[in-house]
Amino acid sequence: MTVLGNSGGLIKTGFVFSGWNAQADGLGTNYAPASTFTINANTTLFAKWVADTTLATDSFRSQTSGNWNIPATWLSSHTGTFSDAITATLSPTSSAATITVQSGHTVTVTASVHTDQTICSGTLTVNNGVILTIDDGTGPDLGVTGTVNVLSSGVITGSGSVVFSPGSTLGIGSAAGITVNQNSGSIQSTSPTFDPAANYVYNAVGGTGQSTGTGLPANITGSLTINTAAGVTLSQATSVAGTLTLTQGALTTGANTVVIGTSGSVTRGSGYVIGNLSKIFRRTMQKHTRSAPRTDIRRSRSKQLREVRSRHNLRYRPLRELCPGSRIPTNLHVTGR
């Protein structure tokens, strides 16, 4: 008789089929699939199971917040569907089919590692002194829809693509900020994409000041947050259509200007701006039509002019009303159109 394999699709969660045995306790004769033996009496074979283990080429996704480099942070799946998921016995690397940091989880990279085909929907933190290398595989190599925090001396580098999508958040700890130069800044990958609709947070700790860097979009439709006690220097003229948040430290503009768009706003804790901060106001003109006796139309010319000025006068609000308590320099301008 020829022994079949697991042709009936038997499943034991967390285990893999490894053949048959003549006894239920597994202490009898083993029979491997495709082996042959002679049946001299009624015979029952029992499935043998061994604990499943993670393969480096499996798909991974976080099952809890934790350390990237500890396997228990992850589930692994041979099929990628996670119907066969087990608690991983390896932590993921660039050999993995896919890697996902799930929404609601914070995963911290505490030792340098290579990765690829990674999606961050939760929060991914790269610790000080740690290098996260993004290898170049097929498709997006690191796609961010959640949050990535790169601490002061942490680095994301590599030849793979790094894409910050609209609504994602990048926490920037490097003194150089984010740059288009692969040799400096928090992100040093070959082809990073910093979407204008993403949110950018400067949050270096200790006594390290920062520059925003040339990689910061010039026209931010998301938000910009300054949370560096030692201050941040603006590397180029920047407009913010969302919210400029001055949590702590000074934002020093130098010869550049921060322009708050018509729909933009400023909020602050103890932070402030040194330099040029401009706010654009747009007044909506409304046309009013009414029926009036002929005698109303024959008003004096001077009275008509007074009414025209009253209806169309643009009022400019002092910037101190927008940022109460801010330190407003004398070369600040508020424009209107």
Image (cartoon, rainbow, N blue to C red):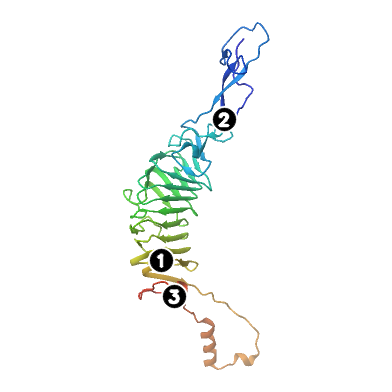
| Residue 67 screen position, x and y as percent | 45, 42
Residue at coordinates 47% horizontally, 63% vertically from top-left? 243
Residue at coordinates 37% horizontally, 65% vertically from top-left? 250
| Residue 199 screen position, x and y as percent | 46, 57
Q: Is residue 290 above or below residue 115?
A: below
Among the two numbered marks 3 and 1 on one chain, the one whose residue lies closer to the N terminus: 1
Q: CA distance from mark 3 to mark 1?
A: 14 Å
Report which quarter residue 86 is drawn in.
top right
- Which residue is nearer to you in this view: 67 or 324? 67
| Residue 319 screen position, x and y as percent | 44, 74
Q: Amino acid at mark 1?
A: Gly
How crowded is the residue under tag 1: few (<14 C-alpha within 10 Å), some, or many (20+)?
A: many
Determine whether the residue tagged by mark 3 lies in a helix, strand or loop.
helix
**Visible in this render: residue 282?**
yes
Left/right placement of residue 230 relative to residue 48 reads left
Q: CA distance from mark 2 to mark 1?
A: 53 Å
Report which quarter residue 245 is drawn in.
bottom left
Left/right placement of residue 328 relative to residue 24 reads left
Is the residue under label 3 in contact with that under label 2 (CB below 8 Å)? no
How crowded is the residue under tag 2: few (<14 C-alpha within 10 Å), some, or many (20+)?
A: some
Label at residue 51: none
- Which residue is nearer to you in this view: 244 or 194? 244
Q: Amino acid at mark 3?
A: Arg
Q: Which residue is mark 2?
A: 14
Q: Which residue is mark 1?
A: 271
Q: Which residue is mark 3?
A: 320
How crowded is the residue under tag 3: few (<14 C-alpha within 10 Å), some, or many (20+)?
A: few
